[in-house]
Image: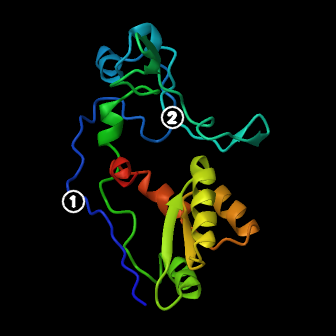
Amino acid sequence: MRLALFWLAVSSRARYDPGKPQEHDGRVPSRRPSDREVADSGVRREEAERMPWFPSHSTVCDGRPCAPGEGNLQHVREDTPRGWRYKQWTQPYIHREAWVQARSRDVPHSPDEVAVYGDAVALAKRTALDGRVVVTSGDWDYRELVLNFVLHAHKLAYHNTLVLSMEAELHSDLTARAIPSADLSRSLAAWNETPAFPDLT
């Protein structure tokens, strides 16, 4: 059985002004957002000054598993004649171009089916029927959709189904349900440190 692996190679190097505060090390800035950062974030200054400096994601809320989307930063809402909607061209944390451009452009790892994806490949081979495997993926927020997909696949007699779990919590949950799951959380976390991450989601 051949397992095709695709990856995104980004060759350009980051160019940024070293005199500007990069703050790409996770340090929370102790300053007010600049006018450019406020404008790039798509909100008014008073809103920007209440926004966090970094994106965040949690799988535990108040000591319990977060409901889908609950552990993510929430976008600004606005009222329209047809009801509320998430405000377009905004994001729920302050946009700092210097921080974005300072992130690594290097591919975090090669698509090595032994060193990097060995466990996933081995699981695919064990799950396959007649050399074929049905693959889906998801993270903790999409756990209900992932479970729905797998259960329907089983109902249609596609028992050669496995999940590429993008978060360890989803992997643990599926494993407890005896659903084949490959834990790719560390691989995704590595990609999350690059500007290429939005292109992978």
Res 42 visible: yes
x and y, in percent, of residue 22 in the image? 36, 35
Residue at the location (52% across, 15% down)?
50
Residue at the location (40% across, 10% down)?
81
Which tag, 1 or 2, sits closer to the chain's start?
1
Element type at marker 2?
Answer: loop
The CA span between labels 1 and 2 is 27 Å
Residue nearer the viewer, 99 or 71: 71
Q: Is residue 172 left or right of residue 71?
A: right
Residue 182, quarter of picture: bottom right
Q: Amino acid at mark 2?
A: Arg
The residue to which callout 1 is attached is 11
Split into 4 quadrants, where in the image is the N terminus?
bottom left
x and y, in percent, of residue 93 in the image? 46, 27
Q: Is residue 149 left or right of residue 14?
A: right
Determine the residue located farthest toward the right in the rendered image.
Answer: 63
x and y, in percent, of residue 142 in the image? 57, 50
Q: Which numbered mark, 1 or 2, is in the foreground of this view?
A: 1
Query: Label 1: few (<14), some or many (≥20) within 10 Å?
Result: few
Residue at the location (64% across, 58% down)?
170
Residue 133 circle label? none
Q: Are marks 1 and 2 in contact (CB under 8 Å)?
A: no
Q: Amino acid at mark 1?
A: Ser
Element type at marker 1?
Answer: loop
In the figure, 142 relative to 26: above or below? below
x and y, in percent, of residue 67 in the image? 67, 39
Q: Is residue 1 left or right of residue 178?
A: left
Residue at the location (40% across, 21% down)?
87
Residue 33, quarter of picture: top left
The residue to which callout 2 is attached is 27
In the figure, 94 relative to 98: above or below? above
Res 181 visible: no
